[in-house]
């Protein structure tokens, strides 16, 4: 019989899995912060701050 892992809650995860998820989240956050910092440094001094979000295509019609 195969174990069904689809109904496990995050509280049921092993310490190793919890550690892995935390490490992945930290790495993603650090990457995002690094890209933002790089953008700020590349555009300094500037009158408009760097945006963290992608606004899409300029002038594109709304759907």
Image: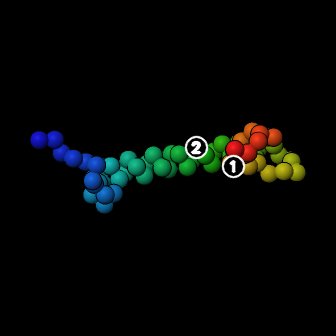
Q: Is residue 27 left or right of residue 22?
A: right
Q: Choose between 63 and 24: the one closer to the eye.
A: 63
* Residue highlighted by disc 1: 52
Above or below residue 35? Residue 11 is below
Percent x, y for residue 7? 27, 53
Q: How is the image coloured?
A: rainbow
Q: Secondary structure at mark 2?
A: helix
Q: Earlier in the sequence, mark 1 or mark 2?
A: 2
* Residue 35 numbered tag: none
Q: Which quadrant holds residue 56? A: top right
Q: Quadrant of the N terminus?
A: top left
* Residue highlighted by disc 2: 31
Q: Residue furthest left?
A: 1
Label 1: few (<14), some (14–19) or many (≥20) C-alpha neighbours in 10 Å: few
Q: Is residue 13 left or right of residue 23?
A: left
Q: Residue at x 55, y 49 (%)?
A: 29
Q: Is residue 26 left or right of residue 32?
A: left
Answer yes or no: do the residues labelled 1 and 2 have beta carbons within 8 Å? no
Percent x, y for residue 34? 63, 44
Q: Is residue 55 left or right of residue 5?
A: right
- Mark 1 or 2: in front is 1
Residue 60 seen in this snapshot: yes
Q: Residue at x 86, y 47 (%)?
A: 45
Label 2: few (<14), some (14–19) or many (≥20) C-alpha neighbours in 10 Å: few
Residue 39 seen in this snapshot: no
Percent x, y for residue 44? 83, 46
């Amino acid at each position: 019989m195969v174990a069904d892992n689809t109904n496990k809650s995050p509280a049921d995860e092993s310490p190793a899995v919890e550690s892995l998820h935390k490490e992945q989240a930290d790495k993603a956050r650090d990457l995002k912060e690094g890209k933002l910092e790089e953008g700020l440094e590349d555009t300094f001094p500037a009158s408009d701050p760097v945006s963290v979000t992608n606004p899409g295509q300029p002038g594109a019609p709304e759907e």
